[in-house]
Every structure is written in structure tokens, then in C-alpha cells.
Image (spheres, grey):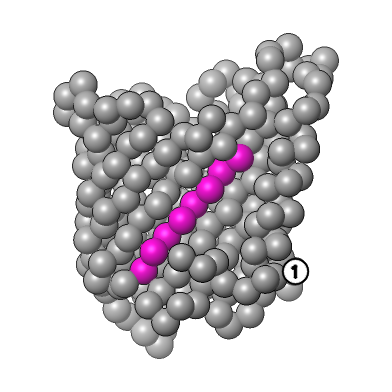
Amino acid sequence: MAFGSWTRTNEFSTLTIISMMLSSAEPTAADDSDVAYNLSIDKLEQQFDQDQTLVEIVTRVGGERHGLGTKSEFSSISDGHVDSRNLLFYTFTFDSWLETRVGIEHLDWHDGAETSGLFHLLASVPLDVSIGLSLRVARGGSIETKLELEKVTALSSRFTLEPRMEWQRFSDEDDVVTAELRLRYGGTNKFRPYIGVAWTRQLNSDLDWSDTTALVGLSYLVN
């Protein structure tokens, strides 16, 4: 799959090179753990009803508590156009259950490009539930809010059921609600394929629509 124009490819390559250069950094005094470099394909997914392919790649370098990383998301639809979202972030973990990310995000959509600041908070609570809250602040001062809930339920030693809900507010009159359900096979720690279904509904003053699509995809830990 071709990932769009030279500009988008160069953007992703620049973020990846920065992260790889940081992998040679030494541990800081505030973090006595060993420095590690990780690269993973968090999502390679096909949404059939929307004829859309999603790719999500994450890199991270650092210790247990501190780290620097990149996150690149690509979305390709049937007409060949590719949207991209690239994030460069610093992450800090509190007591293994609360993680914060602060970074700069660049979006390149079919209707324009935008750079903004991003703050993300991820908490792991009892019953294997993860709660995520993101605030994205654009140059004009507009704030986009995203709330995510995800639970992992072990059905056996190899299969897990993963329901996920997301509420996203782009403005006072523009909300998107998504509910997803994935059945994942975890035969190995690195390669984890899944199938699922997703339901999306958009609510605003001019448009109210919903859509349901089947999913098939995988996640892969490179190193």
C-alpha cells in the first residue's frame, strides 16, 4: 500500500529516525532502569464496509518510568488517498498504573494539515479496565477531547475478548461515539491477530449518521 505523497512519507521517516537516534541515550539519574528501544505495529486493520485500511506504528525509547516515543497512524480509503497523524511525545509512568504523555501532533487530512499540542492520560484500574483521556489543543485555541474505555477479558490461555468504547468531541456541536468488539488470538507475545466489529455514530447540528463495519487485523511487536 502506498502511503501517500512524499511529504507524508518524509514526515513519518523523520519521526522514526529521531526515535532511533534517541535509542542510544544513557539512563538519567531520575530513572535507574535500563534503556530499551521498542517498535511495534499496534494496528494493521481492514474495515470492510468502509473499505478502509488502518495502520498504527509506535516506537519508544527509555526506561520503566520515563521515555520518548513516536506514534504514526495512517488511514487509506478506496480512492487511494492517505490521511496521516504523527505524534512525538514524552511519557512518564506513575507506580505502573498511571501513564501520562505530552507531545506535539501533526495531522495531514484530505482537507488540510494542522499541528497541535497533545496531553494524554492513561489509567489502569481493577478488572483489567483501561481509561484514557486526551486533550488536543490546536493553534486557534480549539480543544478536542477524547475519552476511551477498554477492557481485556481472558476467555482461555490463547483467546481474549476486548470491548472498547470511545467518545470524541471536536466542538460544542460535533461528537463521535464508537463501540468496538475484538476477539484476539494471543498465541505468541509478538503476533496477535483478531477479528471484530465496530459501530460508529456521529452527532452534530447538521448531520446525524451511524455505521457498522466488520474488522480483521493484527498487532505485532517487532522488538
Count of labels shown?
1
Question: 219 above or below 156?
Answer: below
Q: Which x, y percent locates residue 35?
A: 70, 21
Q: Which x, y percent locates residue 92?
A: 66, 30
User: Hey, what amino acid is under mark 1?
Assistant: Arg
Which residue ends up furthest to the front in the rendered image? 1
Which residue ends up furthest to the left in the rendered image? 155
Q: Which x, y percent locates residue 22?
A: 77, 35
Q: Is residue 157 left or right of residue 86?
A: left
The answer to if 58 sits in the magenta stretch is yes
Residue at left 48%, top 44%? Answer: 41
Question: 7 above or below 44?
Answer: below
Q: Which x, y percent locates residue 31?
A: 74, 17
Residue interval drawn in magenta? 52-59
Residue 27 position by quadrant? top right
> Is residue 210 visible from the viewing direction of this image?
yes
Residue at left 49%, top 77%? Answer: 81
Residue at left 36%, top 35%? Answer: 191
The residue carrying mark 1 is 139
Crowd band around label 1 with a 10 angstrom C-alpha radius: few (<14), some (14–19), many (20+): few
Which residue ends up furthest to the bottom in the rendered image? 206
Residue 23 position by quadrant? top right
> Is residue 142 visible from the viewing direction of this image?
no
Main SS type for the magenta part?
strand
Residue at left 62%, top 74%? Answer: 5
Question: 1 above or below 158?
Answer: below
Question: 52 above or below 60?
Answer: below
Q: Is residue 204 left or right of residue 196?
A: right
The answer to if 46 sits in the magenta stretch is no
